[in-house]
Image (cartoon, coloured by chain):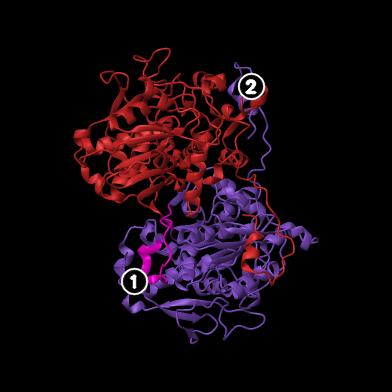
Chain colours: A purple, B red
Amino acid sequence: MNGASLATGQRSLGDPSVTFPLWPPQLRGCPETSTAEIAYPVEVDYAYEDVDTALFAQAPGPDLARWAPLLPPLHAPTLGEGGTPLLELDGLPGVYLKDESRNPTWSHKDRLNRVTVSAAVGAGAPGVVVASSGNHGASAAAYAARAGLPAIVLASAEAPPAVQSFVRAYGAKVLTMPAEDRWPLMRRIKVLTMPAEDRWPLMRRIVDRFGYHPVSNLTVTHTGHPFGAEGYKTIAYELFAQLGRVPAAVFTPTGYAEMLYGVWKGFAELRRLGVAETAPPMYACEPAVGAPHARALATGTPAAIVELGPTGAYGIACTVGGHRGVRAVRDSGGEAVPVTDDELRAAQELLARQGLWQELSGAAGLAGYRRLGREFDGPVVCVGTSSGFKDLETGRERVRLLEDVDVDVSLDDLLRATDA
Amino acid sequence: MNGASLATGQRSLGDPSVTFPLWPPQLRGCPETSTAEIAYPVEVDYAYEDVDTALFAQAPGPDLARWAPLLPPLHAPTLGEGGTPLLELDGLPGVYLKDESRNPTWSHKDRLNRVTVSAAVGAGAPGVVVASSGNHGASAAAYAARAGLPAIVLASAEAPPAVQSFVRAYGAKVLTMPAEDRWPLMRRIKVLTMPAEDRWPLMRRIVDRFGYHPVSNLTVTHTGHPFGAEGYKTIAYELFAQLGRVPAAVFTPTGYAEMLYGVWKGFAELRRLGVAETAPPMYACEPAVGAPHARALATGTPAAIVELGPTGAYGIACTVGGHRGVRAVRDSGGEAVPVTDDELRAAQELLARQGLWQELSGAAGLAGYRRLGREFDGPVVCVGTSSGFKDLETGRERVRLLEDVDVDVSLDDLLRATDA
């Protein structure tokens, strides 16, 4: 659409002098700098000197292909991802929600999966495999289906009921684990958020034996797919176009921090290319019961593994952090902001009460902004990642039925008779 | 955004010489031409001679305000509705899905509710009331919340579980009827689709006594809100921009036919304004178990009321048709295309297997296109209205758990062990 990819190769985040060709994608982090305790991610490098910055004058819209020069090659077809609205919040002037629930499978993950499934196609893989019981699994299944590739999703029986249907809808082969049988002493929410390796010895087998392309993590601390964060850069490009400037701060729901890093990299590129003069501080908003990035930043380690307490924010509840999140927060001058479930619910309700129904995890950006309580000199963006349809409690409402109502009832009495 | 509304008044579809001022909205159809059997709708008229057709050169994107001159005044704030992607289908070259699941509450209804809640604000109403257990109720609640108006939703306890949560999320007051108690002999799906008047004597009371603005129907055959179909016109404007031409045919899921009429009116306006030379035939795709528009067209009546058999397509299963749908099909040279649940499921699966998960009702456009089996000389658009999250069966999956799997399993054996 706007020319070919200018991607030139892969570069280690453990040591920027360590580079690899663009193909094949390094699916297990950087093999040279990683240790038994810390896995360092690999990212994509570009011929930045060849970028025509007129790229950033275009209007945002669906299909990441409009940003093709600064993405890895897009071998997989689009489902119309990206081009999501930016909405100023009532009662919070200058604070905006970037509504990623408006993507093809109603979450931000579609930006990643357009790119990672493209990598699978480009690598000639016979299929895609992903360990996820939620948005990531469904999104990977949708993009694999669109590309004509089979997909295997390793899921947990503890996923929300509506999400079970969601992941299956796209025709993926779903392997559902009887979680309670295997880890009877674990809290159910933990099962959902264990690293894939612990959950699924099968994952690596499917990769090693059958050649399926993994689009979720395979390493001890999170590295993910080396191309994945590139898809999230487009959020930064869109925000720059929508605001007509760089925001004063960006708050993102943070699990493994792939999106956080991607958005940061996008802004860093705008600055590097001279399109923008500054780049915003990035705030990693993660559930307080775990918060591996807060831990890593506080202790000065490249990435941390933590215990995880119970939380309803299953989409971002991670025991395992990654070095990308640490880098994005540190390099941008931001912070990690742990948020409680009470704070998440309050932010979720604030949004829903103005017409924006986010998944509990999806409200973490706003929850973090409110928790931090800081003034910024310019627009603040909270990324909202996903629709309320994906919550654990969705579909489990207890409905209060209306019995006989006198039609001469007063408005006050009528409203008291409602169930919400 | 692009200037003020050029709306001049309201005009009867029963007799175009019968007109009304723009305010107040005629909420019970045309009072002069309607009879005890047939209610004629009222629509909005414009100063077409004052339209600057440069309007249609702009790129589609979120927020209907970009089409303000050809809409009633937009007093209610946006949630970023519209600007949805158009995707060509795999295996069906030249056939496109207009993916309306990408709206703020993940259905086409947001285009209508931006306009009808604007009418409520413009009329100075103290609140909004809607009878709907699905997309329309949730969308109205979201737009009312965004506008700061209270909303009452008259719902049925038989709505899908996830949709129960959805309608409640936006803080509306929900009155849920114990359907089975009142009509023990009715099939549950019928209860969902009865006209509001039968279901809810309360509806008119809330309108008459408390002054709440109704954004759903109040008449014997469907007339709905006189401003509502205007919001759907923007689908036509977007399609014209996205295709660079008028499509050769448009297939829409059809319940009360408000969207069908709106899309048709949008194309008719493009032709009237000289922007386009033609307007496409419109195909009304409705569940074969009811199909009031097919009945009205076959019998030559202005609108029909039918018996309704069981169907999973609850979003478009209507006993009551409207004159707008009859007019759109007839004036455009289209047809009504009844579709069976088997055909709907096949279309839904065809879409999901390429990454597009539509509600069963939302697949009716494609089901109708396949049912008709006709060749068209140019691009064909099937409107997809809503996400699979809203289906009756969603969240009711029976998951097959994976028991011990030998890690030396073959790929074929592994895939046989999956539950989907």
Are labels 1 and 2 assigned to the same chain? Answer: no
Residue A293 relative to residue B384: left or right: right
Farthest top residue?
Answer: B36
User: Label 1: which residue?
Assistant: A4
Is residue B207 part of the magenta span, yes or no?
no
Residue A3 relative to residue A167: left or right: left
What range of the chain is rendered magenta? Answer: A64-85
Secondary structure, mark 2, is loop
The quarter of the picture where residue A277 lies is bottom left
Q: Give percent across and percent down for residue B192.
A: 57, 29
Numbered disc 2: what chain?
B
Image vertical order of residue B113 relative to residue B87, above or below: above
Residue B348 relative to residue A288: left or right: left
Numbered disc 1: what chain?
A
Quadrant containing the N terminus of chain A in the rendered view: bottom left
Nearest to the observer: residue A249 or residue A159: A159
Secondary structure, mark 1, is loop
Image vertical order of residue B190 relative to residue A309, above or below: above
Nearest to the observer: residue A316 or residue A346: A316
| Residue type, label 1 | Ala
| Residue type, label 2 | Trp
Nearest to the observer: residue A260 or residue A45: A45
User: Label 2: which residue?
Assistant: B183
Is residue A73 part of the magenta span, yes or no?
yes
Image vertical order of residue B107 relative to residue B176, above or below: below
Residue drawn 68% across the image and 23% down it? B181
| Secondary structure mostly seen in the magenta stretch | loop
Q: Give percent across and percent down for residue B280.
A: 28, 38
Residue B388: mark = none
